[in-house]
Image (cartoon, rainbow, N blue to C red):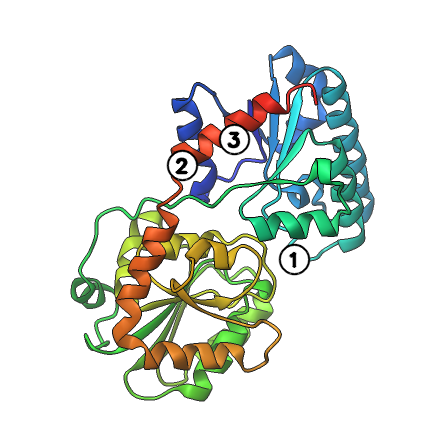
Amino acid sequence: MLFVPPWPRNPYQERLAEALSRVGVGVSPCKRGRLQHPVRLLRGGVDVVHLHSAAALIRDARLAGACSRALRVLAALTWLRLRGVTVVWTAHDLEDHDRARPRLEYAFTWVLARIASGILCHGEEASRQVTRRFHLSAARHPRAMPLPPYDAGVVIPRAEARQRLLPGVAPDDVVFLFLGSIKEYRGVDDLVAAFTRIARPGLHLVVRGPAKDPEVAQRLERAASQPGIDIAFGFVPESDISAWMAAADVVTAPYRRILTSGSVALAASHERPVVAPRMGAIPETVGDGGGLLYDPGDPDGLERALLDAIDARDALPDMGKHALQHIERFSWDDAARETAGCYRAWRGR
């Protein structure tokens, strides 16, 4: 069974593959280029192709190259289906976050949704949105399952984490953390602007992650001079994530658009409440009371959610515990059993 394409810096595939191996399903990572050689894949004994990122399969600097990739991938998947290979697509997103070629991507994913033996989504709302976007029949409605928790590693006391990572922050100060890739769709600009309006002594906004968008990075560098704002660009090793989570009171995920958020699942797994829009699968990921969610259509929603978090500072630890308890109800072993069950149920479909 193949995971296409591999996600080397995202723990999702690794955790799922490990759990699948425990239920007797072996997984191999497969780069997108191999998908264009279906005869070799079939000769290699592949029985399931599990797709995890539709946009990545056709990404190319040239429009002609992207169109060519789309046609070749769809032809390869159709050929594999006709020869009995099960094709599964986990729709983590409705569209490419960068929106590089929206029309081509929509056409590609519309066809993919019909070629696939079945579609998986992480949440009932995500499943409904995929059904609406691609006009799927009831028979092709995606199978919904929750996002499992990530391993929080060694629990670090907050005081110790702050002394190590944020030595200038007092133990009783409130720390909002953004952790992850800094891209336009993640709304870090909006977060910094909202925080600037409410900034006061004892409040801190900490932003850590690689800056993928140069324009966004330049704007954030200028904002870093504001009191209480601490921004540093660069990849955060997985070994440091637990310490950053421990140092924070609240994790922020101010998305402008999202379907499924691994960052929100990561925060819940580390017993941290989130400030995030009520969008996609986010409410199902943290559960009722596991975060401060706001209406993404309200221009003041993010700012009010930050203020609500400050007002509820004494209740934040309980919110984090609730988020952890909620996400722990569905484990990676549960996900593996359901995923393997889908492979069997969709064989020959």
Label 3: how many residues lie within 10 Å, few (<14), some (14-19) or many (20+)?
Answer: some
Question: Residue 148, percent across and down?
Answer: 42, 43
Question: In the picture provided, is 6 more to the left or to the right than 115?
Answer: left
**Label 2 or label 1, whichever comes before in sequence order:** 1
**Label 1 or label 3, whichever comes before in sequence order:** 1
Image position of 265 with respect to 160: above or below: above
Q: What's the residue at 32%, 58% (across, down)? A: 322
Question: In the picture provided, is 313 more to the left or to the right than 43?
Answer: left
**Numbered circle sitting on residue 339:** 3
Residue designated by label 1: 98
**Separation (CA) of disc 2 from disc 1:** 29 Å
* In front of the other: 331 or 186: 331
Image position of 287 with respect to 9: above or below: below
Residue type at numbered disc 2:
Trp
Q: Kindly state the secondary structure of the residue where label 2 is placed.
A: helix
Question: Residue 55, percent across and down?
Answer: 67, 45
When asked about the image quadrant of residue 202, the answer is: bottom left
Q: Quadrant of the N terminus?
A: top right
Residue designated by label 2: 332
Q: What's the residue at 50%, 76% (across, down)? A: 302
